[in-house]
Image (spheres, rainbow, N blue to C red):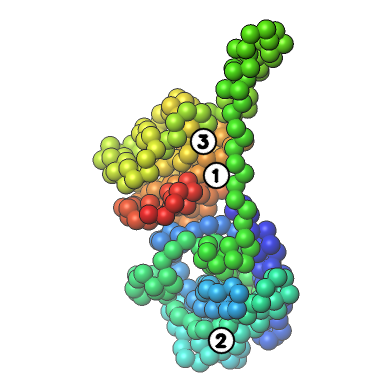
Amino acid sequence: MDGYVKLHEMLETALRQAGEEAGMLLGQGLSATLTDSLTFSKAAYFGDLDDGVFVLDVESREEYQGQFYLVFNLRDAILMSSLLLGIPAPRIKEKQRLSIIEPDDIDAFGEIGNMINGAMNTTFQASLAGKSHLKLQGSKKYVPEIDPLTDDNPLPNGDYLLFRSRLEMEGQEMHHLDVLIPVALGNLFDPQPLPAEPEPDQTADTDTDAAQPGTGAGSATLSDETETPGKSGAVAGTTGEDMIAVFDNDDEERGRMLEMLGFVGFKLVESTLDADIKEVFSKGNVRLVVIGSQDADDRELAVCIKINAMRQDQPVPIIMCAQRWTRTAVLKALKYGAREIVIKPCDPDEIAGKVRRLCRLPAS
């Protein structure tokens, strides 16, 4: 994930400190190492979740108001709370196997959560220019196919910045801690610069100068420029009418996506996944690409890779939509250039919101 350098540094420091302090509380060597930072929607994050999770809700107050979430693997939460309670190892294994977390475990894990929140509070207050205060609000368990996934459970719908840290404890198999921060709150913590405006096309001015009578030098300049075209003209899909390219092998799915994108007012170009991408991009100034499929497998990811390679100097945002995602496929798609992950069937409001943000269009 590009940007959010300051937020990444704050969390890296806070989580490292939190791991050390929690390890001291547990009497075990525990480390939390920040490894990845990605952008996810709630639907993408929970859509392919295999294991149960334990979610801690943190409220951010003062000048940075909002809520974010600490998401632990449920087995990790059971392990740490059980260690704090002094439960024998065989019983811990049984509780992990059956995903049993009891009231005493919740209370014990709350102590660990308070320690993590304290480390984050200290780091944020020392790093942010304005007043900041973080308060742990509560916790909840979520097990796929058992607990309901609703608009607000186990956390609200929306787009999140995901900061993933690897948890390690000697002699124990552990997973990771995810910090999920809503994009709007992330922008309060670490404001992101607006993208630079594209340089104005100088061709028209050059042509006007060359057309003036008695400007022999001007004619020579025009000749030099036609021999060496500008960078923007050399990059596929950066000239002409603004457009969105939709790639999907299913005719009906492409048609539905085109209907969802009709509000934009851009030229819409559709094609199959095996189309000549450079030819598609030659039809206009590509502002956004939508790639659709049933499974997010290597074929669809290859399209993403090709687009990213072709436009590496002037990246174009990509939305990848698929009916079935695996966690590996999500991580690969984001690595290969996708900016957004969507699970089919696509919701028109969700698509509209992502398109407006990625194309920097005004709200409806």
Q: CA distance from mark 3 to mark 2?
A: 46 Å
For mark 1, give the secondary structure: loop
Q: Does the rendering let one see residue 227?
A: no
In the image, 32: left or right of 45?
right
As measured in the structure, the alpha-carbon distance from the residue carrying label 2 to the one carrying label 1 is: 38 Å
Q: Residues within 10 Å of mark 2 (few under 14, many from 20)?
A: some
Above or below, 124 against 199 in this view is: below
User: Image quadrant of residue 314?
Assistant: top right
Going from N to C along the chain, the mark reached first, 3 or 2, is 2
Q: Residues within 10 Å of mark 1 (few under 14, many from 20)?
A: some
State the SS at label 3. Answer: helix
Q: Nearer the viewer, residue 171 or 262?
A: 262
Which quadrant would residue 254 be assigned to in this image?
top left
Q: Which residue is mark 1?
A: 336
Q: Name which residue lies at 62% across and 67% down.
A: 189
**Residue drawn where x is 38% and y is 49% of the image:** 322
Which residue does the numbered mark 2 point to in the structure image? Answer: 110
Residue assigned mark 3: 307
The picture quadrant where one finds residue 22 is bottom right
Locate the C terminus and report the quarter of the image it occupies: bottom left
Between disc 2 and disc 1, whose residue precedes? Answer: 2
Answer whether labels 3 and 2 touch (C-beta < 8 Å): no
